[in-house]
Image (tube, helix red, strand yellow):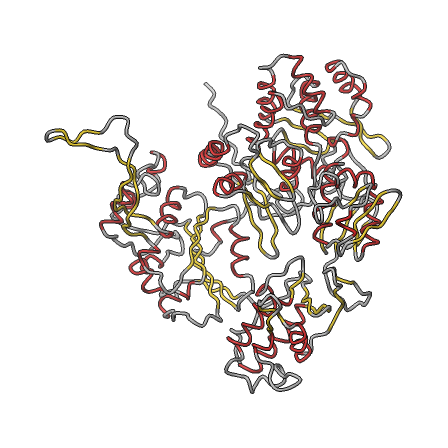
Amino acid sequence: MINPKEFTQRAAINSLTGIKSSLGNLRKVVSLTYLLYLANKKKSSIVYAESKDGKIVLKQEYKSFIQHYLNNSEVIEKIDDNPLLTSQIESLYVGLTLMFAFGRISFENTSLSMTKERTGGIRYPKKIDFASNIMTLDLMLNSDSEEAVKATLLAWLQDKQLDNKIEQRISIFLNICIENNLFKLRHGENDLYFQTEGIYKSLITGNEVSLESDEIVGPTRILNSMLRENLVPWLNFKKSLVTINADNDFNVKEYSDIISTSLSIRDIKVDNNVESAPKEEDTDNDDKQLPLQQITYGAPGTGKSHGIKKETAGKSVIRTTFHPDSDYSTFVGAYKPTSVEVPVMTIIGKEQIPVVNANPEKKIVYEFVPQAFLKAYTGAWKNQDEPFFLIIEEINRGNCAQIFGDLFQLLDRNDETGLSDYPISPDEDIQKFLLTDKKYGFAALTDAQKAAIPIEVQSGELMILPKNLHIWATMNTSDQSLFPIDSAFKRRWDWQYMPISDGKKGWQIAVNGKCYDWWQFLQKMNDKIGSTTNSEDKKLGYFFCKAKNGIIDAETFVGKVVFYIWNDVFKDFAEEAGDLFKDIEGILTFNKFYTIGVDRKAKVVEEKVERLLQNLGVDEIGEYDNVGEKVIDDTESASRRVLNVEFEDETIAIKRFPQYLQVLQKIGLDKAEAVASEKQVDVLGCALVSKNKEETIEESQYSYVEVDGYFVVKGIKGKVMMNFLPLISDKYSLNLKIAYK
């Protein structure tokens, strides 16, 4: 008798959320992938292409099969233009392997690196090792008539939409395939990680969801392609906004619940922290090396929360924020009034009897409601093989002794086991919750989960922090209203200082038609703060203020920065500050930064902001025009972000409109006009490239430039270009790399 082979411990999946690879024309990709599976007699792997003049073309045997199977010769003439043959392998890897999981795509020559096709435009023969999803697709298509399936595959191979039942079923299947994928939006220094579940949950509570991002990267690019190409037909997608398609009868609410259930019963490891090409060899991260209890502290804006968010992305996280009113009950849990539905009862004689066909009525009852600590505590015990993080923001804004109470004793962790050295006996309310609650407590555990948890912990008799529960906190050292943390509490934490450093974003302050370097301002201001107050705590970090498209405008600068330095830093050091607040006449008081506009609203006096920057000695590095576009000078001292568009043979840095026009001409104005006509990105409701002028543009601050019979809008911001150019790249599979540098 032969036993089964022992299971294979597989490495975590790299979600590649930061890779800059696009994949459009997804119908063509899906159709050809499935046809190759059929052409190779449903074998587990296929090398489908061969080299020809620096490109790859479909092998003749597979062309012959597809032509015969679809009974169409015209489609074969253009089949070598399919993204499966023209796109870089990294784009195909994200689409076919990570998202749809049709199979693992790799080079036929295994010695080639996955980054081999990034430059030069040369493509190399590839291999697909098919996965079970392609079998599921095959089973699904076999349920329809062969004629209908062939008609759909032919239409998809030509990138045509049919809106028939087969297409609808394939669309649903593709969306099921991507449920477990991790996507990312970039907002300044903050990265938002989400799954499609998050889109549906937000849609249910609101009318629209924004997928706007400073830079569209990774699987998010392909998710956008699915939305634009109507492969999520129950959703509308325009100008980065997702809304529910009222004309489609798909039940979004029910599907959202199904996704949540699916994700909760899967056990798939996702590692999203690596943002480079897929590695040939993965290295395991040792979660045991992560500190169990750590407080990250530093000046405001140094990126403390962002660093923790990035390090814990893709992991199980419970997050809470301390404040002066926080206490044990808001951190651990307490009895609270809750609303429950109960049957409507009536009394007949001496008995209570439910009323037939009556809608349930709501009744207020008191139930034990767990808070952040108990949710993290039970969540970590339930799955001890994975790290679980309890994140406490602004820990010093609350009274830690009052909030932690007897939990303080649990913070003594054994160096070898990671468990609490000194268990505590919780009160009866917490014991009952741990023993009986079927949502957050231990009552709903499987037998296997219970076997891994000590009986005393399951019953609530004792509380012990498990080895995989990491409690991480942030502390803003400049906070005025903080509670002192005693030395006994401090000793139970690792302390990590977050120094002030250049965020390398190239942010600038735009004031009175001029540009000033944000990092130079911070350096000079922090030097002034240090020499005047002899305090490190009051200094400003790079992310103290949020920039929009790399620019901090005067309103934001005064409202965030000037308000802080005037009220919290130099309020008691006016004389020691020297010339910092010197005005033409007298002192540059805070009220001088504002005036009342004609609409009776406060308006920033930009000349006063400029005066402050000059007093500090911050250099002017450029100009800002009246449309809001940065005017780039040629001085080497100018340090700013420039939108770069990388083609296979050259990179064009868009400093002004001529470079933007050069990019459009290199792509093809006909292609740009075709995408612009869809108005997914526009200005004043008008297309960015068109064959006719519109009065709305000519009567605005924008203008037209005519080139080869096309009218290109001049005066748009870099952000508009950033949103528009990827649409063209995706539609025509150009694989352009578009990013600020």
Left or right, 400 with respect to 37, comes to left
Q: How many labels does the image show?
A: 0
Q: Which residue is drawn at 71% across and 54% down?
A: 740
Vertical order, 479 against 352 (above or below): below
Percent x, y for residue 64?
Answer: 78, 16
Q: In this view, does 711 lie to the left or right of 394?
A: right
**Is residue 371 placed above or below 37 in the rendered structure?**
below
Quadrant of the rendering where the C terminus is positioned? bottom right
Q: In which quarter of the image is residue 163?
A: top right
Q: In which quarter of the image is residue 89?
A: top right
- In front here: 627 or 662? 627
Residue drawn at 51 percent across, 58 percent down:
305
Q: Where is residue 239 in the image (x, y as percent from the top left)?
A: 65, 44
User: On the rendered image, what quadrant is the N terminus found in?
Assistant: top left
Q: Nearer the viewer, residue 90 or 507?
A: 507
Q: In this view, does 739 lie to the left or right of 322?
A: right
Above or below, 304 relative to 25: below
Question: 549 left or right of 576?
Answer: right
- Residue 436 appears at what percent x and percent y? 27, 40
Q: Which of the two residues, 467 or 442, is positioned nearer the viewer here?
A: 442
Front-lying residue, 120 or 717: 717
Which residue sits at x=63%, y=21%? 164
